């Protein structure tokens, strides 16, 4: 008898047939996805951008457990708006599941990437002008998003005063640069009332390939690390409940949770009542 560990070619065959089965299963489910509820689709991982759904679902769930009636979702870096279209789709489902109103804000200069400031913006990978937005076209694609157009260093100064957003529960970071992400993260220092006590973040540019070679000393990762070094009462942490799972997806490593420890709702109990160890 052969064992998988002694015969590498059998092992390879076994894994490639598993991969094929997985692909067939995914194809069938995506064809008949209209038969499933949104919750089931998230569980079966057959929706586009499951990482967006994960963050929005959990932000709504947290808000609902805290008794809040509205929250905001932000995308930093909009470009053609594919991310926002996806957010709107997910939000319309979430508003049906949870009794909650969701505001959506998208930040972008509309001019594409600015000029990289230094090595920390990875000029070996990004160029000024990449990902320009077609504002007129995008306006017609979106139903409820408010687009905040301009360089983030300016728009971030007036956003809270101008829009007085409902508490922000999920943020999608896709500004690509260290310098832009640094500005976005500093918004966490605004008044606590503008945030949930724990915020679900997705960082788009922290894994990559052998070209980008994202690391802790440049790009979005550096912005996260510096934020944590500079702030004691607010920390941005990996999402350990995801990355500890047996079958992980790469996006599990791109979800981070912002903890605002001094938020007046941070300590509100939201877990299961009557937790008791059952004796045998
Ligand atoms: C990769 S694109 C976003 C893609 C989009 N999230 C999607 O999923 O389709 C990055 C965007 O960040 C924007 N951006 C980068 N730095 C910025 C800054 N300082 N102010 C405003 N927008 C900025 C650029 O205009 C660009 O459109």
Image (cartoon, helix red, strand yellow):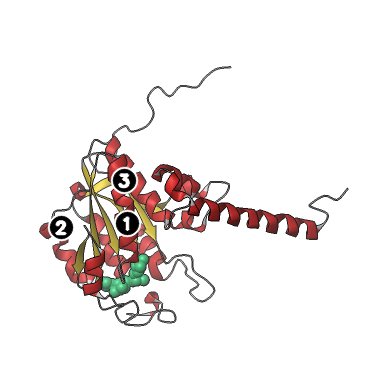
Q: Is residue 29 left or right of residue 107?
A: right
Q: Earlier in the sequence, mark 2 or mark 1?
A: 1
**Most extreme residue toward the top, as rendered?**
280
The answer to the question of whether label 3 and label 2 lie on touching residues, with beta carbons closer than 8 A, is no
Which residue is located at x 31 percent, y 61 percent? 85
Numbered tag placed on residue 160 in the rendering:
2
Q: Is residue 271 above or below residue 188?
A: above
Q: Quadrant of ligand 1?
A: bottom left
In this view, the residue in front, 189 or 272, is: 272
Viewer-nearest of discs 2 and 1: 1
Q: Identify the residue under disc 1.
A: 87
In this view, the residue in front, 31 or 51, is: 31
Which residue is located at x 36 percent, y 55 percent? 201
Classify mark 2: residues with Cα within 10 Å, few (<14), some (14-19) or many (20+): some
Q: Is residue 64 above or below residue 3?
A: above
Secondary structure at numbered mark 3: helix
Secondary structure at numbered mark 1: helix
Q: Is residue 109 left or right of residue 247?
A: left
In this view, the residue in front, 221 or 1, is: 1
**Residue 67 percent across, percent down from the top left:** 24, 35
Residue 89 image-quadrant placement? bottom left
Check the picture and name the quadrant holding the C terminus: top right
**Disc 3/disc 1 C-alpha distance (Å):** 10 Å
- Mark yes or no: residue 72 visible: yes
Which residue is located at x 74 percent, y 59 percent? 12
Numbered tag placed on residue 94 in the rendering:
3
Secondary structure at numbered mark 2: helix
């Amino acid at each position: 008898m052969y064992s998988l560990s002694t015969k590498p070619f059998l092992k390879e065959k076994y894994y490639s047939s598993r991969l094929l089965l997985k692909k067939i299963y995914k194809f069938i489910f995506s064809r008949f996805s209209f038969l499933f509820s949104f919750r089931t689709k998230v569980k079966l991982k057959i929706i586009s951008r499951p990482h967006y759904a994960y963050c929005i679902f959990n932000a709504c769930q947290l808000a609902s457990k805290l008794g809040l009636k509205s929250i905001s979702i932000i995308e930093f870096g909009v470009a053609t708006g594919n991310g926002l279209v996806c957010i709107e789709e997910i939000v319309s489902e979430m508003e049906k599941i949870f009794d909650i109103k969701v505001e959506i804000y998208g930040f972008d200069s509309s001019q594409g990437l600015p000029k990289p400031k230094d090595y920390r913006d990875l000029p070996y990978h990004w160029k000024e002008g990449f990902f320009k937005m077609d504002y007129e076209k995008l306006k017609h694609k979106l139903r409820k998003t408010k687009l905040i157009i301009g360089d983030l260093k300016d728009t971030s100064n007036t956003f809270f005063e101008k829009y007085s957003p409902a508490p922000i529960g999920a943020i999608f970071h896709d500004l690509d640069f260290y310098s832009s992400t640094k500005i976005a993260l500093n918004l966490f220092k605004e008044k606590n009332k503008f945030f949930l006590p724990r915020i679900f973040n997705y960082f788009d540019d922290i894994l990559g390939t052998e070209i980008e070679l994202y690391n802790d000393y440049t790009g979005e990762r550096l912005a996260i690390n510096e934020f944590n070094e500079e702030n004691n009462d607010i920390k941005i942490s990996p999402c350990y409940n995801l990355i500890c799972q047996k079958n992980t997806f790469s996006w599990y490593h791109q979800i981070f949770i912002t903890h605002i420890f001094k938020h007046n709702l941070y300590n509100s109990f939201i877990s299961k009542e009557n937790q008791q160890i059952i004796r045998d």
